[in-house]
Image (cartoon, rainbow, N blue to C red):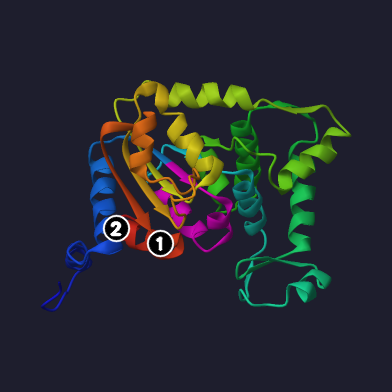
Amino acid sequence: MVQRDVYSFDEFIQHMGEVGFQSTHLAQARKILSQMLERNAFKCLSFTANIMASGMRGYLIRMLEKDMVDCVITTGGSIDHDVIKSFMPYEIGSFEMDDKELHRQGINRLGNILVPNQAYELLEKITFEVFKEGGTFLPSEIAHAYGKYLHEKGKRSFLALAYQKNIPIFAPGIVDAAIGLNFYFLEQKVPFKIDVVGDLKKLGSYLLPQEEVGALILGGGIAKHHTIAANLPRGGLNYSIYLTTAAEWDGSLSGAKTREGVSWGKINEEARHVTVYGEATLTLPLLLYGWI
């Protein structure tokens, strides 16, 4: 309990750890993240597309700039949003807007973030330009190709920086996104194939040799499961931090706490791990403060 003035963020976090409930878990998450960085563990960052659609995109970019990430596991939608936002911003609306009226205006609502149809027209144009020759690609090679394009355009983007730093981006569900529809149309014009299984082998080549692996996982779904499951063959993650709003009582993967991953061997029995409940646009800045 805070009983005196607090003059530094370190003191603030220390006192949060003594509050109880999720404040204590967040303080524990900062300790685990610090251990991951100090011990030079191989660092995985996993997140869902809504994180990239939000202003948290800037935090993700800063994590790459500060060498806090060795590999990324995300969704196809994250690629959508990073490419689009490199050229045009999204607008802030509200959760209570008239969705019928938005539809008539050609505006798509993502929570309280507004994405115009023109954004996806731009994305399709870029996709056709980047992959005009066709070919067979791993999902990580697709992310790399977009990153190369954005880097050559001089854009400060997540994909461009990952390309520049040679940080692999894995997106196992890559076609469940606007670019997936783009690829469907592209395949009508040129030979185009995606080798998803090949990327699993590539991800394993990064993880299996590592002495220690840690993961910061924002949200759930395929990105979360791919991250923890890929670590099963090496004995499970050694460090794991979940930032989530999903509940575990429905048995969903998204709602499963870190401790459930221990039962599967996806998180090591001796691992340092914590589940923090709270929406990531609130919890992530507090977690990363001082590092980025």
Tell me the SS state at disc 2: helix
Q: Quadrant of residue 12?
A: bottom left
Tell me the SS state at disc 1: loop
Residue 278: which disc?
Answer: 1
Q: As displayed, is residue 153 above or below residue 207?
A: below
Looking at the rendered structure, the kind of residue marked 1 is: Gly
Q: Is residue 24 left or right of residue 50?
A: left
Q: Main secondary structure of the magenta part?
A: helix
Mark 2, residue position: 26
Q: Is residue 135 left or right of residue 48?
A: right
Toward the viewer: 31 or 101?
101
Toward the viewer: 71 or 167?
71
Q: Is residue 165 visible?
A: no
Looking at the rendered structure, the kind of residue marked 2 is: Leu
Please tell me which residue is depicted at 56% across the width and 52% down the height of the picture.
157
* Residue 260 position within the rendered picture, expressed as x and y whole percent measured from the top left: 37, 39
Tell me which numbered mark, 2 or 1, is placed earlier along the sequence: 2
> Mark 2 near mark 1, Cβ–Cβ under 8 Å?
yes
Please tell me which residue is depicted at 72% across the width and 44% down the height of the picture.
179
The region drawn magenta spans 45-65
Q: Quadrant of residue 70?
A: top left
Please tell me which residue is depicted at 59% across the width and 59% down the height of the picture.
53
Q: Is residue 93 magenta?
A: no
Q: Callout 1: few (<14), some (14-19), or many (20+) C-alpha neighbours within 10 Å?
A: some
Q: Is residue 88 visible?
A: yes
Figure quadrant of the N terminus: bottom left
What's the distance in space between the residues labelled 2 and 1, CA to CA? 9 Å
Residue 28: which disc?
Answer: none
